[in-house]
Image (cartoon, helix red, strand yellow):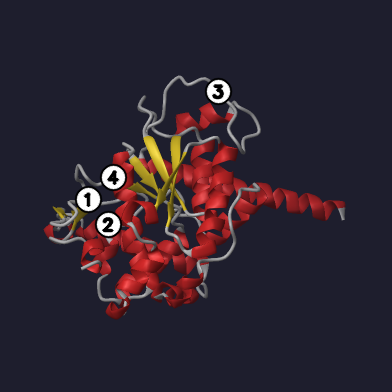
Amino acid sequence: MELETQVRQKSKILANSSVESQVKQTLKKIKLSTPKGVPPHFVPGTRTSNEVPSVRRDINTKGKKEKILVALSGGKDSAVTAFLLKKFGYNIEGLYIDLGISEYSKKCLGAVKKLCEELGIKLHVYDMKKEQGKTMQDVWKKIKKKRLNNCAVCGVFKKWILNKTARKLKADKIATGHNLDDQAQTCLMNVLKGSPKMSFSSGPVTKNISDKKFVPRIKPLFYVFEEDVKKYAIQKKIPFIEGKCKYSQESYRGEVRDFVNTLSEKDKKNILNNFEKIFVKDKKSEENKIKIKYCKICGEPSRKNVCKKCELMK
């Protein structure tokens, strides 16, 4: 029995080490800058304060401390993203977008507040009702005739809010909790919808987009499996809520997610690797370079003359 307990403990340590190691490698690719000469200090999740400087040396130190705004949803992925960035010594703040989806939004906000309190980071809350005069549920009712699923509409609004708020807060980067499973789903969805090139801008850091009004997005969990993220969150006792928004069951992504869940880890990796290869071959092509315009209605970055958010509200 004692041997079995030791084996379990060792496997937990190895799993944690694997997640942290993978995220560190991803951050190297992103080339985030971290502060030089900052004295050791305690960071949640570390055994000793001396671990932090050694990690800093691993990550392309440039002497500048970038401000990273972590998009927090209340779920495990964004919570682990914030936890690890804080653990590795980055300058982070949290942003929660309160969409006003009844009790679900309140539960999520509760988990986010607890996380930020434990990590000792500043939390910004964007209240959609206060800022735009309507909740996400109000928006769904307004555009019901357009026959778009709720998740797609929600995604458009969240991206618009994230970018505008990050710019207002003078953030250098936006960090999201997208994991390897999420990315595999997105790649397949774009293929099935006949728009594979929509995935070419996706990666650990946003590709092919450079504009003064666009805040670059990073995904530290890009190469980490969803199951590993969940195990890490539970083992580290990171605050998060289980389950998904009840409206997500209607989404096309939900169907693709169910399919991806049947694939092996190797197959999921292959989906991402193959898209990376295609991108490398085509990255010099002019048609793959995203040309940014400004929405004629709200002035935010857009691929068209009118952004998706404003198009939906017409």
Q: Residue at x 49, y 76 (%)?
A: 258
- Measured in 3D between alpha carbons, the distance from the residue under mark 1 to the one under mark 4, in whole angstroms, is 9 Å
- Measured in 3D between alpha carbons, the distance from the residue under mark 4 to the one under mark 3, in whole angstroms, is 30 Å
Query: Which of disc 2 and disc 3 is earlier in sequence?
Result: 3
Query: Which of disc 1 and disc 2 is earlier in sequence?
Result: 2
* Left or right side of 170 for 43: right
Query: Which of disc 2 and disc 4 is earlier in sequence?
Result: 2
Q: Which residue is mark 1?
A: 209
Give percent across and percent down for residue 283.
Answer: 20, 56
Instruction: Name the kind of residue labelled 4 in the image.
Output: Val
Query: Which of disc 3 and disc 1 is earlier in sequence?
Result: 3
Circle 4 packing at 10 Å, graded few (<14), some (14-19), many (20+), is many
Q: Which residue is mark 3?
A: 40
* Left or right side of 136 for 262: right
Q: Residue at x 33, y 43 (%)?
A: 166
Instruction: Name the kind of residue labelled 1 in the image.
Output: Ile
Q: Is residue 297 above or below residue 218?
A: below
The total of numbered circles placed on residues is: 4
Dot 4 falls on a residue whose secondary structure is loop
Circle 3 packing at 10 Å, graded few (<14), some (14-19), many (20+), is some
